[in-house]
Image: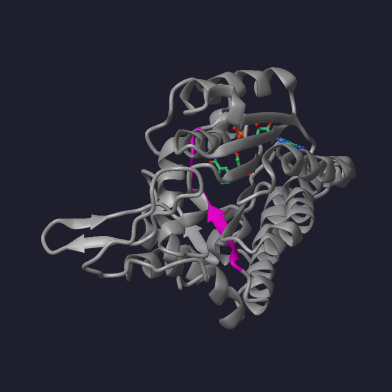
Amino acid sequence: MGKAGAMTPHAKTTHVVMGMLAEGATLYEVLDFPGQGAIRMPHPAMSSGNVAVITGGASGIGLAAAMRFARAGMKVCIADIGPDRLKDAESRLASIAPNGAAGIMPLSVDVSRIEQVRELDGAVQKRFGGTDILMNNAGIQPGSQMFGPAENWQRILSVNLWGVVNGSQVFAPRMIERGRVGLIINTGSKQGITTPPGDPAYNVSKAGVKAFTEALQHELRGLNSKVSAHLLIPGFVFTGLTARGRTEKPAAAWTAEQTVDFMIEKLEAGDFYILCPDNDVPRKLDERRILWAAQDIVENRPPLSRWHKDYAEAFAAFVKQA
Ligand code: NAD
């Protein structure tokens, strides 16, 4: 079993266990011939014919994941707001899915509204028979200020945090009940871990997603469930959320497709924390930033000391030690 209870992580093995690439087929071992590198096989939840539900699936990271799952022959439901966006995404997905539009289900859903999330679950159940992969990914980042309007804070928390809670609470019991290998992937953010100044409501929402998803995985582990939860932590990704008028990807950013490729690789490895680098920030630097933030408490420093002028030199030196 993998670290998150899903599968064998990076197993060195001289044999490969293979299903057929037909409905319900699983390909789940790692083949590693000396000198030839590892040939990765898909996670069993990502088998052809299985079902993926992706919130915020009509653009950006969600759509890139939907494209990957659809191309693999999975049935895909994208839940998003905005009929035009959903329609465009549907035709893109249908054009690459082996069974065309038959395996694609676009649904207008506001994830902050639990009754709509329940309807989503019901509709997927009715058309596709259940869910193997749930990606709670819908998110907004309109900006926020500490003493800004309460409605702004409430909207950010209700989409980014309550959307994840709603999705997990509505879908997980049925996914567990099915007794099949399943994945719940919640999209967090580095801003929910190192909580940089500038967008406090977004940070609070994503810190909540982290705490919730950790607790969810702990719960699933205790139930010996075949469903595991995972926290996707994207780096800087060029999407509608970050474009801010730009039409070309900044050099620092990853594409949504790169992010999804990385996510799938880490899910196959059984990782819970899927900490994505980008073209500016390698993993080592993220590790130092995360450690520094945690040590604010241990060292009894002021909060967010990374951005405190008295600690600028110490932080720079700490990063250099890596
Ligand atoms: P995006 O704007 O392209 O995608 C977000 C999608 O969520 C959109 O299609 C939007 O319509 C949908 N959405 C918004 N509110 C919704 C609601 N109430 N109900 C249903 N759908 C809703 O942006 P993205 O970058 O692909 O964002 C995906 C996730 O990744 C978000 O949770 C975001 O916070 C997170 N993230 C993104 C980055 C980045 O650099 N792009 C970094 C860290 C985390």
Residue 56, by quadrant, is top right
Q: Residue 264, percent across and down?
A: 44, 50
Read off the magenta span.
226-238
Above-or-below relation of 103 to 88: below
Say which residue appears at 84% left-offset and 40% top-offset. 116
| Count of numbered circles on the image | 0
Q: 72 or 194, which lies in front?
A: 72
Q: Is residue 156 magenta?
A: no
Left or right: 105 with respect to 61?
right
Which quadrant contains ligand 1?
A: top right
Q: Residue 157, percent across and down?
A: 79, 49
Residue 95 in view, yes or no? yes
Say which residue appears at 64% left-offset and 45% top-offset. 137
Left or right: 113 with respect to 107?
right
Residue 35, by quadrant, is bottom left
Above-or-below relation of 53 to 269: above
Say which residue appears at 43% left-offset and 65% top-offset. 287
Above-or-below relation of 73 to 248: below
Q: Residue 27, percent across and down?
A: 39, 54
Residue 254 in view, yes or no? no
Above-or-below relation of 232 to 68: below
Left or right: 121 with respect to 43?
right
Q: 92 or 235, which lies in front?
A: 92
Tell me the quadrant of the picture where the C terminus can be found: bottom left
Q: Residue 109, percent across and down?
A: 78, 35
Residue at far left of view: 35
Left or right: 289 with respect to 177?
left
